[in-house]
Amino acid sequence: MPNMSMTKNPMPSQDPDVRNKNFKEVALGYTEEQAKDEAARCLNCKNKPCVSGCPVEVNIPAFIAEVAAGNFEEAYQIISLSSSLPAVCGRVCPQESQCEKNCVRGIKGEPVAIGRLERFVADYHMANAKEKAEKPAPNGHKAAVIGSGPSGLACAGDLAKKGYEVTIFEALHLAGGVLAYGIPEFRLPKSIVQKEIDGLKDLGVKIDTNVVIGKTISIDELMDEFGFESVFIGSGAGLPRFMNIPGENLNGVYSANEFLTRINLMKAYKEESKTPIKHPEKTVVVGGGNVAMDAARCAKRLGSDVTIVYRRTQAELPARAEEVEHAMEEGIKFAFLNNPVEVEGDNGWVKSVKCQVMELSDPDESGRRKPVAVEGKFNDIECDCMIMSIGTSPNPLIKSTTEGLDTEKWGGIIADETGLTSRKGVYAGGDAVTGAATVILAMGAGKKAAAAMDAYMQTL
């Protein structure tokens, strides 16, 4: 019998006043009974509108039907045909603006909890699968992937399944890219990321860490001297942006990239850390995206009183609604319609942030209301830590060391729909092309590039 409940099965989670003091995963996951009950809400629509909202085109109704029947491993096998990282996507993808946005059940109630079911299925597989993925027979071709973030992992996985000898080159000491250094443990446990990466290694993917393409080795050398027939650039967008306001160079001012890397990759919040991070008393986070929420929630777990400063209103916050809700539940404050204009210091350290009070203009032709300054009105917010989370750009190292690689003025690599760049045999995708976006969009770009690289190398 279908479950015609208008609401999703709620996700079990840690109590807000407990979780804001630890780095353990907030969401605890569905039980088998909850998963089957939620799966029974799916109408198994004939035209599958949810699939059209998925950047990697997972056959959503098919896997959910298997969950409803209690066939959890069969459900995983369906997902894995399209996605290399289901346990990751089930946790961090913005389903509410993609697959669930198109769900028919969402017209008169809440959509089916597709992301929660994907997470359940992936976790079930990890806990119960006994056999490793079978390594395909080699096809005699070699491909290189630059960067081990979501686009690189997706590209490598699809190529490996076709028998290519794939090597991923990662600049840091640990694979995973933004999954390892950017997304906090309480949203995405690193053990989950490692298991997903181990699955790719079982397929034959090699990962070389501590290799900075453009410094350690160039793309030209990969192709001319090491025999890689095609290269995928999935190096992400790790260059932080700042506001260029007075006082931004004071001690205690971080980019969100640095702050999150120190927390997530280096575990600097632990007492025994070799590179400890200061536990601030009062923190200001500038920005309104998911990265800002991650930084704010990390600072809260360090014992800080945290305020997120955003120049628009709550209605315009670009972060996922769930992340904003979790932040508010955990006691993080928001200063809307405020825009920093100066960082004030004391003895070389930040002591407060001066903010211009803003208001929203009348809608323009596109319907968008712009934030404009309210003349003469300012707020001072005390803090001993300030985290800038206003966006990132691709690192310029690869473009500056690769001949004939066309880029946009802002630094993004120019690539067509298949990922092909201006260099023959060189493809690119994810944040290196689009600028900072989502994990699943980066994966979709990696998959498209893998298909194009396969077609190209089969002609050689």
Image: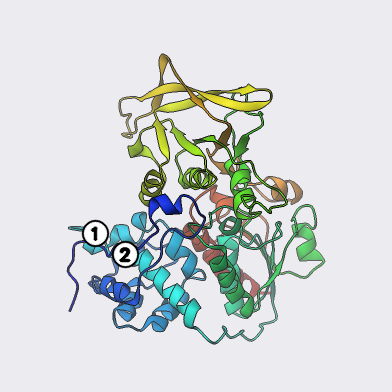
- In the rendered image, which quarter contains the C terminus? bottom right
User: Where residue 144 appears, x then y in whole percent?
Assistant: 69, 67
Q: CA distance from mark 1 to mark 2?
A: 8 Å
* Residue occupying image coordinates x 38% and y 55%: 15
Relative placement, left or right, of 224 versus 121 is: right
- Tell me if mark 1 has few (under 14), some (14-19) or many (20+) residues whose alpha carbon lies within 10 angstroms of its own: some
**Residue named by callout 1:** 110
- In the rendered image, which quarter contains the N terminus? bottom left
- Tell me if mark 2 has few (under 14), some (14-19) or many (20+) residues whose alpha carbon lies within 10 angstroms of its own: many
Relative placement, left or right, of 388 versus 209 is: left
Q: Residue 251: which quarter of the image?
A: top right
User: Where residue 428 appears, x then y in whole percent?
Assistant: 60, 57
Amino acid type of the residue that numbered disc 2 sits on in the rendered structure:
Ala
**Label 2's element?**
loop
User: Where residue 157 appears, x then y in whole percent?
Assistant: 58, 72
**Which residue is more in the foreground, 392 or 263?**
263
**Residue named by callout 2:** 113
* Residue occupying image coordinates x 43% and y 65%: 90
**Which residue is more in the foreground, 221 or 235?**
235
* Residue occupying image coordinates x 40% and y 42%: 331
Q: Residue 68: which quarter of the image?
A: bottom left
Amino acid type of the residue that numbered disc 1 sits on in the rendered structure:
Glu
